Amino acid sequence: MGIWEQPSTARFLTAAYGPTLFASFGYGAAIPMIAIQAKELGATLGIAAFVAALTGVGQLVADLPAGVIAERFGERRPLMIACLLDAVVLAAAFWAHSLWLFACLVFVHGCSGAVFALARQTYLTVAVPLKYRARAMSSLGGVFRVGNVLGPLAGAAITATHTTAHAFLLAAVMSLLAAIITVFMPDLPTNNTAAQVARESIWTILYQHRRMFISLGMAMLSLSLIRAARQTILPLWCDQHGLNISTTNLVYAASMAPDVLLFFPGGMIMDRLGRFWVSVPTMFAMSLGFAVLPFATTLLPIIAVAVWLGISNGVSAGIFATLGADLSPSIGRAQFLSGWRVFGDIGTALGPGVISFVTLFAPLSVAAGVLAAIGVAGGLRFCTQLPRRGALSPSVPEE
């Protein structure tokens, strides 16, 4: 019987999802302001998008070390340290007056996020029975999205009367609260034999599962790419069309709101019908949203496209973590999941990076078209890799 089914469920749910709620609240307040703050510090449009991409770069750099840390020290302590580090970094971002210092802080913010995300995913993978897995993971994604709705709303209220940098101070407070909640998180039982084998070499584990990483990993990379691109292109699109900071925050929140409504139905679909039936529709629907974005030049059409992107993405909340949990082996689970997260975080880094690169040579509308094409390619990849029914089986090591 897993923790999910035990009498301590209420405590478990609070401890498992509470840190994510607070951290994502701060994340939602800060993320849409990164590109805007970079511009206020003197960045061009392309450089602002590059600074925004550093969150994903930091996550990517820290992914594999996060797997080693989680395997050696468990989930609770790394989670607490990651939240505390994030609080310090975000507070420093509030005071930063140099573009390059601000960029470095954004990078470290991404590093702490990698440890946080890996610890959360590993914890739920072990704690929750398979029959509830997709709902648990989608709920984790849903809680993150709740924070991403409330955070921009709070950010809009703060930036309406204060500077853009105050959004980072709010995020720092939220990360500190997330660290406090981890004190009440129950520890998981450990498998000392499995952990010892896994500690021998993270590279061995990644090599043993290389074919799986190449096949499904590339599909997940494209999904993460267009998800991250949405978070960057919407604020830049609003700014380009003359919307003020507070209105930009509201547009961003409007895009995240449907995610809150659809995450649990999406989890039920994954548990009852299969992972295919949320992955493929999400890719093609988001591609359509990016394709029509260049035609949205005033407030109401921009909001409409933002909401459509939110609806398209909302049903797939938790799909990345669910597929990783399905495929993860019992031995070296944390290292495996850290490798799995590399592909997602490459996409997270490339999303704003694609926008940055394209806008060096073409308008922002062309970048939207490129994102639409990437989404279609990823959707076709999912069509060939995912079974039409049920969950995936754990990845089998290869020689």
Image (tube, grey):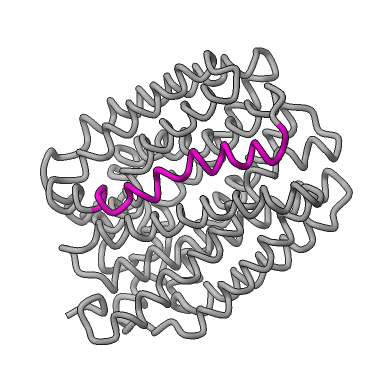
Reply yes or no: does residue 115 show up in magenta.
Answer: no
Reply yes or no: does residue 258 show up in magenta.
Answer: yes
The front one of 312 and 112 is: 312
Q: How many marks?
A: 0
Q: Is residue 339 left or right of residue 107?
A: left
x then y, percent, for residue 107: 68, 51
x then y, percent, for residue 26: 61, 59
Q: Residue at horizontal 42%, vertical 77%?
A: 15
Residue that lies at the very extreme toward the right in this rendered image:
97
x then y, percent, for residue 210: 33, 46
The front one of 280 and 399 is: 280
Q: Is residue 349 left or right of residue 209?
A: right
Start and end of the magenta stretch?
Answer: 244-267
x then y, percent, for residue 148: 52, 51
Dominant SS in magenta: helix
Q: Is residue 14 left or right of residue 233?
A: left
Q: Measured along the vertical axis of the image, is residue 14 above or below residue 109? A: below
Q: Measured along the vertical axis of the image, is residue 99 above or below residue 350? A: below
Q: Residue at horizontal 54%, vertical 55%?
A: 150
Q: Residue at horizontal 57%, vertical 57%?
A: 62
The front one of 64 and 139 is: 139
Q: Residue at horizontal 24%, vertical 56%?
A: 326
